[in-house]
Image (cartoon, rainbow, N blue to C red):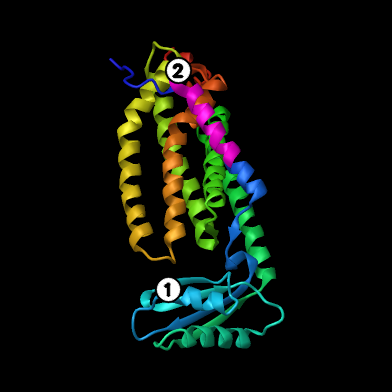
Amino acid sequence: MNKQEIDFLGKRKLAMIFSGLLLVVSIASLAMNGLKLGIDFTGGTLVEVGYKQPADLTAIRKALADAGFDDAAVLHFGSSKDVLIRLKPDAEVSNAELSNQVLKAINQASKQKAQLRRVEFVGPQVGDELAEDGGLALLYSIFGILLYVAWRFEYKFALGSVVALVHDVIITLGFFSVFALEFDLTVLAAILAVIGYSLNDTIVVYDRIRENFRKMRKGSSEFIMNVSLNQTLSRTLMTSITTALVLVALASLGGEIIQNFAIALLVGVGIGTYSSIYVASPVVLGLGVSKEDLMIPEKEGLDLDGMP
């Protein structure tokens, strides 16, 4: 006999308060502080330099700050001998002159001389287009998910999944705003990946809820949904834990170039696992889902097929 082991939905009010607090903090931070946009969106100059020995990023940052480049982002690129320097746009200085100033500043402050590898300029117009296209990609993906889940399940499930996805995206963006982490194209890609991961987790739960609604004759909607959440819990946790282990390794060992990407995925996976249990399902329950909503409609004239 099916039974519930953990009363997930019985704690949905506490979960709503917790989610509400996270959303309020995230939205307030986004409204007041915004996101620390990377050069992909703001435009600017990329300068790549190479060393014969592993480079000291702290010394390079100090040298650039002393030369007036306070907002320069310095990180390893590929190996500890390759350094990528990101600079904000400066209309008064040409691209070539800017790279010469950077190279002069870091070589004067170190015995180890850097060699210029490449210089790239990203215009602010391109950054605006990328920001606009990225926002549209988020909206299109959420709208497509709404249609897909409504077609596969029922409109109440579609609304529940979209509420969970918006919840996950806002909190992940809020995390980057609160901690002033750089938001670039790699982080945007991670946000889109979080949408896919969270939806997959939610669909697994919804599929088991639909199956149990059709199979279990007794029990309220809340009881059947709790049974379904317990049945899928081990799968949800195993998937999330194994994914998180990989992301922790990427964030700690993968270098600065993909660190924020891994952090965005790590936050998204964690909040996505939580929302598939405590947001998506409670929303569906609150909308009044019942067994009748998921029953397979009988074909007309089915009783006449057996008549002579």
What residue is pinned by disc 2? 222
Is residue 304 depicted above or below 198 in this figure?
A: above
Residue at the far right in the pictured view: 92
Q: Looking at the magenta stretch, what is its main secondary structure?
A: helix
Residue at 31 percent of width and 17 percent of height: 2
Q: Is residue 8 left or right of residue 104?
A: left
Of residue 217 and residue 115, the one placed in the foreground of this image is 115
Asked if one can make out residue 219 in the rendered structure from this viewpoint, the answer is yes
Residue 135 position (above or below residue 15): below
- SS type, badge 2: helix
Say above or below: 89 vs 164: below
Magenta-colored span:
11-25
Q: Which residue is mark 1?
A: 57
Q: CA distance from mark 2 to mark 1?
A: 55 Å
Q: Earlier in the sequence, mark 2 or mark 1?
A: 1
Task: Kindly give the residue lying farthest to the left in the view shown.
Answer: 1
